Structure formats: C-alpha cells, structure tokens
Amino acid sequence: MTLKNHISLSKVKKGNIVRIITLPDGLARTQLIRLGIVEGDLVKCLEHLPGGTIVIQKKRQEIALGSKLSHKIIVIIN
Amino acid sequence: MPTNEINHLEHHTHIEKSSNIFDSVSPKLVLVGNPNVGKSVFFNYLSGIYVDVSNFPGTTVEIAKGKYLQYELYDTPGIYGVSSFNDEERVARDIILEADIIINIIDGVHIERDLFLTQQLIDMGKRIVVVINFMDEIKKHHIKIDIEQLEKLLDVPITATTAIKKEGLKELEQLIDKARQGKQNKILHLKLHNMLNSVGSQAEALLVLEGDEITANKHGIKPLDQREPIYIDRRNRVNNIVNQVIEEASVRKHITSLIGRWSLNTLTGIPILLGVLYIAYLFIGKLVAQDIVGFTESYFGNELWETWIRSAVSDFITPTSFLGTVLIGEFGVLTMTVTYLLFLLFPLVFAFYITLSFLEDTGYLPRLATMVDRFINFLGLNGRAIIPMILGFGCVSAATITTRLLSSEREKTIATAILQFAIPCSAQLAVITALLMGAGFQALLIYVFVIVSVFIAIGTILNKILKGESTPLLIDLPPMRIPRMNNVLQKTSLRTFSFMKEATPWFFFGAAVIGTMEATGLLQVWQKALSPFTEHWLKLPPEATTAFVMGLVRRDFGAAGLYEIVMNPMQTVVALVTITLFVPCITSILIMYKERGLKTATIIWIGTWIGSFTIGGIVAQIIV
C-alpha cells in the first residue's frame, strides 16, 4: 500500500469499491462509527454528484456525505 | 456467560431532574431507537388516545407522553447514539437517564447500524427489551436473523414485529416486565463501577467517560476523553454479533429502492422533484389553500362566525368605540383572529403537516437534500435546508418552524432570513402570478431575475459575514417506503394540534396590537409617513402605501390590495418586488421571534424593511 494510491473520497467514481483509510476527526467521525463506518471498511460509491457530494453504501446502509466531508475522507480503490 | 458475577448489589441512585416533564412517580417506560424505525407506531399502539405533546423544557423538541398500564410512556426523538451533539440527542439523553425500562426498537434491515445504540444502552446498565421491527421487509430482502442467538449474545429479551401490520405487538406487551440489563463489557463495567461515587449512576458514568460535557458538568467533574476507544470497541462488538446472527442472500433490487436511486441522481432527480412539487402544489396550493380555505374562510369565518359575533358583541359594546375596534373591528381579536386561526391557518397547517409527514415516511427528503447539497452550499447551508425552503413557497410561517431540523444556529439564521425575504408564500404567489400575467413577459422576467438575485445575495452575504462554518452534510439515507396513511394521519394531528396550541396566543396578541393601532389612529399615521416614499422613491401611486401596511398583517392582503390600483407594467414589477421582499405577514414575524430570539429576529425584520424599499427603489429608478 503506497501513499500515492491514497485519494480523497470526493474523487472516487460511481460504482467503485474503496477501502477507507482515514476518517476526519470530530463529530463526523463519531457519527460515522455509529452508523457503522470505521477505518479499514470496504464501501461502495453509490453516487457521485456534481461538486463532490458522495453517497456510499455498506451492506444496506446508504450514507450521503457533503463535499466538504468527502474531501477529508482518504480512501484507496480496491 | 452470566453477567451477574460482577453485577452490583447496591442501588444506583438517580438524581431527579427538576424539569417539570417528569412529574409523576409512576415507573417510566421509554421508547428509544434510530430515526425511521417506526417508534411512533409503537407509541400510538401502547399509549391509546390520551397523549400529551409538549416542548421539552428549554428546547424546541417535541415530546409525546402517554400512559400504558402502570407506566408513564415516553417517546423520544430518533437518535443514533446517546450523547449531546444536538437538541434531539440532549432531550433523548435526559429521558433515557430517567427511564426505568427502555423498549429499544431496531430496524431489522439496518441491524448493524441500530445495534450500536442497543449496545450503548446495555453499557449504560439500563433495563431493556429489544424489538426487531420490519420483519416483513427482512423477509423481502431474504435476510435471516437468528433471534435466539442474538438474545443470548445481548442477554436481553427480544421480540420480532411488523408493527405497521400490528404483528408481534401483543408478544411485546408480554415481554415489557421481563426487561433486564444486558451483557456488558466487563472491563468497561468495572471502570464505570469505580466512577459511581462521583457520578451517581452507571448510565451517567458511561456518558462522562464518553466525553459528554453536560453530564460531567452536572456532577461538577471534567468529561473524560475515552469516546473514541469506547466507540470503536462497541462498533467491533456489534459487528461481531451481527456476523453471528445474520445470514443473507444476494440483494435483489426493489422498485422502491430504484426510485430512491433515481431521486439522488441529478438527471433523474430533478424531474422527480418537479413532479413531487407539482403534486404538493395541487394539494396544498390549489385544493386546500384556494378551494377549501376559500370556502371555510369566507363561509364559516366571514359569513357565519363574524356576522354572529359582531351582532352578539354589538349588544354590549359600541362597534366604533375603542374596545369595539379591538374586539370586532377590521383586525378584531374576536373576528379576524378567530377566522384566521380556525378557518385559514388550521386547514393550511394540517395540509402542510400531512404532506410533510407523508414525504418523511417515504424516505424521499434525505435524498432530495443530497441531490441539492452542492448548490445550497454556496448559500452557507447544507442540503437539509431545502426542506424549509420548499415549504416556504407554501407558508413561510410553517417553514420557519421547520428550520429546527438544521443543525447549527448559523444555518437556522441564514435559512430564516432567506425565507422571510425572498420566498413568497402560496397565498401571495397566486396574486403575484395573476398581476404578472397582466403585466407581460418582460415584467415577469425582471421580477424573477430580481427575486432570484436577492435570494442568492442574502445567502452569500450572510455566509460571508456570519461567524463559523456550516456543517457538512452527513445523512443516513433511510430505505424508500410506502407510507401508511393511519400513521401519517396520527403524526399530522399531533403536530397540527401542538402548532395550533403554540400559535394561538401569539395570534391574539398580534391582532390586539394591530387593532389598538387602528383604534388609536397610529396605523393611519404610519400610512401617511410612508406615502412620500412610495410616490417619489418607488414611483408608485400613493394608494400603494395602504397595500404595504396591509401586507404587514398578511402578505396576500398586501398583494391583493395592488389589484385595485391602476399601474403600468413596470410599476407593477416594482410594487410586486417590494411587497415580496417586504416584511412577511404578522404570523411569520411572530414565529420568527419565537424561533430565533429577539436579537436575530429584529435584525431580520428591520432588514426586510430596509431591503425591500431599497431594492424596490433601485428597480424603480432603473425601469420606471
């Protein structure tokens, strides 16, 4: 796993499956853990809207993330 | 493995809160769950008809309270975990801390998400019963849940329901008395046990350990920063449990989930949005606001009620006297106010809440918020703000209340300002459309251009000058579901009732003020003072002043007043721009004061005065 494979979630294309490397600190992190998303998880990019709003899916759980947040989430494409 | 080996014998003392919502000595039975798990269906089933809805002290969060057997039954807002991140969580936390027995409802289709809260409640040492709801959908998704195994792993009684079809509810009633503390993480439990001296209860000890400031302050200690490790450990425990009890076949797509996908995508989402808006307009704007309210207001209100009360009061009080003007005059407390409340506001608010509750239950709103998120970011808001804005085109007052669902005060202020300035309500829209149609296409274009520019400008400017940053969108998209009408109706009547209960005193107050102004001649003074302004700066006929003052009482009154005045097309545009931006109706002002507080509301209110006349004037200087 090299660092150059690390991209921000806002750059991931619709349909890609990615592994989450880092979640931003703070409230968003807490909320994501509650919803079932932790670092190391595999998630699918269900929708990539213009401007970087991203919808991710893990099992039946779908979560929408605004662009400010998706920019701060680092992933690698699986 | 039995948990009682480290179970303590001493009683965890509760610190009774002084808030008046917990007034009884009966044991408290509390419904807790994530959003959209069908809690209200359980509440309605268990509570029967005697339900009391009130604002939780110090918040705008509404709490339903009822009676079930010997228990005091409480509903709580949907939460993903217990802490103090927003008003809903704070309210849920306070009620959970007071709970004797908790019924924890989980969505079987999202068991991985929901068990986090379950496990947290168990870690708090609360006596709980777990209900797995939506068994019908679980079958549809070909998911198998080993309930016996889950019962063993959590060590609490569990039952399965399809609440909406009333399946499994009787079995739940049998289980309530069997509620118990579940299996806790021993290391965590010992830590909490050691904190009992300074905190009082295991539940509060956990919150302090998880860094909950409010709970820590209550006991005069500093919050501990163990949230991250506790959360990660809990998440892992939950995932572990889920792996042992869930078996699922490959996921087949349903038509409802396809519609959910389509409404997210910009390409298909915009036509869906337009369709939804059109249907909502037909229902609220056309059927209720025009046809039904038109009938109830003029027939029941003006013709029956006002005629009767006028003649009844006239027997004792001269209609032209001071008291007569205030009570039964044009803005009378007994005439106009009663008509507005019962025959205009009540049907309108009911229509809004039924539409809102219906849309909420479908799961469409979070998807809409997602689709428009990026556009709304420029205004300093995140996607959620679309909901009050759309509602504003129906009724600005009702929409101002729904700004409660935004997460920060900053966002609430921006959304309220946009609503009060730039969004015409349905009543006004009807008149505006009619006048613009008469004034021609060019007039329409100028009007739309000015209003849209103001809309964007307000958001952009407030986003620049207000301190802080808006919260980015982070929402859980619930599954798309077909709403059950009886549930929608129940929710609607509760909301309508509590809205009416709160709005009514304000209405009487507002009417009394305007009535007094009329009776003392202050209203006419105001009209005179404004008229040079109207003629020279706005370049409008002097009669337009009356329309503006009338617009203060009700927006559509103002616009309707313009009907009578002869104006050229460009004057029409100026008048309509001014009246759209001008102070909204008295209800929305009062509600804004109630929701935003004295300072913010006053700034916005004065802002609409200055803004509307400045912009109207500039437009007048350019085009008339």
Image (cartoon, rainbow, N blue to C red):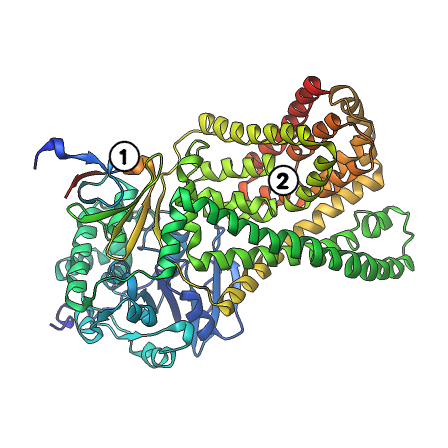
SS for callout 1: helix
> x, y (%) of residue B526?
79, 31
Which chain is home to disc 2? B
> x, y (%) of residue B221?
28, 47
Q: Nearer the viewer, residue B574 or B158?
A: B574
Label 2 and label 1: CA atoms lie apart by 36 Å
Q: Nearer the viewer, residue B10 or B152?
A: B152
Q: Which residue is mark 2?
A: B424
Residue at image coords 67%, 28%: B442
> x, y (%) of residue B172?
34, 77
Q: Residue A71: give its label.
A: 1
> Vertically, is B421 above or below B76?
above
* Quarter that holds the N terminus of chain B: bottom left
Q: Residue B75: give its label.
A: none
Dividing the picture into quadrants, the one containing residue B69 is: bottom left
Residue at image coords 48%, 43%: B386
**Going by the picture, which residue comes out furthest to the left?**
A1
> Vertically, is B62 above or below A10?
below
Q: Nearer the viewer, residue A4 or B185?
A: A4
> Crowding at label 2, few (<14), some or many (≥20) Cα neighbours within 10 Å?
many
> Vertically, is B323 above or below B95?
above
> x, y (%) of residue B107?
32, 64
Dividing the picture into quadrants, the one containing residue B97 is: bottom left
Q: Nearer the viewer, residue B149 or B561?
A: B561
Q: Amino acid at mark 2?
A: Pro
